[in-house]
Amino acid sequence: MAASDDQKWAEIDQQFDRDEGPFDIDEVDLDADDVKRIDLGALVVTPFEGMQLRLQVDQSKTTVQSVLALDGSSGMEVAVFAGPSRTSNVPEIREEILAAASKDAGTAELAEGPFGVEIRRSQPQVDADGRKVTHVTRTWLVHGPGWVLRGVLFGLAATQPNNEEATIALTECFGNMVVRRGQAPAVPGSLIPLTIPKTQRQ
């Protein structure tokens, strides 16, 4: 990217703050209202009407890696990663995603989104029937104290980023998320596992 582009994205990064979320657990009082939230340990989700929630687990089925929030024709995969406590490594993460897209014969570009700079990516894939398709996503990255929250949108919210009706529920859901990072040491960039809600445990 040109230096002028780098400055543009840096300015957008600086202008964005988390006054309207996502939040750190120390910034909110979850007991101040009667809203029924879904507690996933490192992440607390406020559901929206009609939302379907699915947990993505690892192969051993012991670690919840991410959560899927589904809204009809759109969806969002959310994961929490360790991050630097004071500085932000989000620009470096974006560069890694852009490089990966190019390496995999896809395309990716930066754009201004509701949470600062977002990544809009198109990736060639082969579906279950062997047909070549293009997978389109939007990625939101937000840095908090010691954490990075990543949301990857797909479906109509990704293919039509200016379609407010398709995006508004997922935008509000992401903005209302609360990260409970914990005090355990972790290398920046490493996944912070989630936990299964007590109501879903056997």
Image (spheres, rainbow, N blue to C red):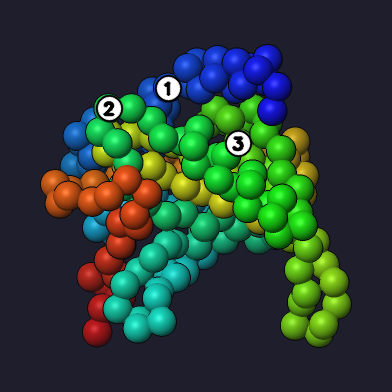
Q: CA distance from mark 2 to mark 3?
A: 21 Å
The answer to which of marks 3 and 1 sits earlier in the sequence is: 1
Residue 119 appears in which quarter of the rendering? top right
Q: Earlier in the sequence, mark 2 or mark 3?
A: 2
For label 1, the residue is 17
Q: Depth-wise, is mark 3 or mark 1 nearer the camera?
A: 3
Q: Residue at the location (33% across, 27% down)? A: 87
- Residue ID for mark 3: 118
Type of amino acid at the residue the image marks with label 2? Arg
Which residue has dot 2 on it?
86
In the displayed structure image, the side of residue 195 where residue 79 appears, left or right: right
**Label 1 – label 2 distance at C-alpha:** 14 Å
Taking the image as shown, residue 34 lies to the left or right of residue 119, namely left
- The disc labelled 1 sits on which kind of residue? Asp
Residue drawn 44% across and 70% down?
Answer: 56
SS assignment at label 2: loop
Q: Residue at x 24, y 84 (%)?
A: 202
- The three-letter code of the residue at mark 3 reads Glu
Q: Position of residue 79 (x, y in %)?
A: 42, 55
- Mark whose residue sits in front, 2 or 3: 2
Image location of residue 96, percent across then percent down: 55, 45
Circles 1 and 2: CB atoms closer than 8 Å: no
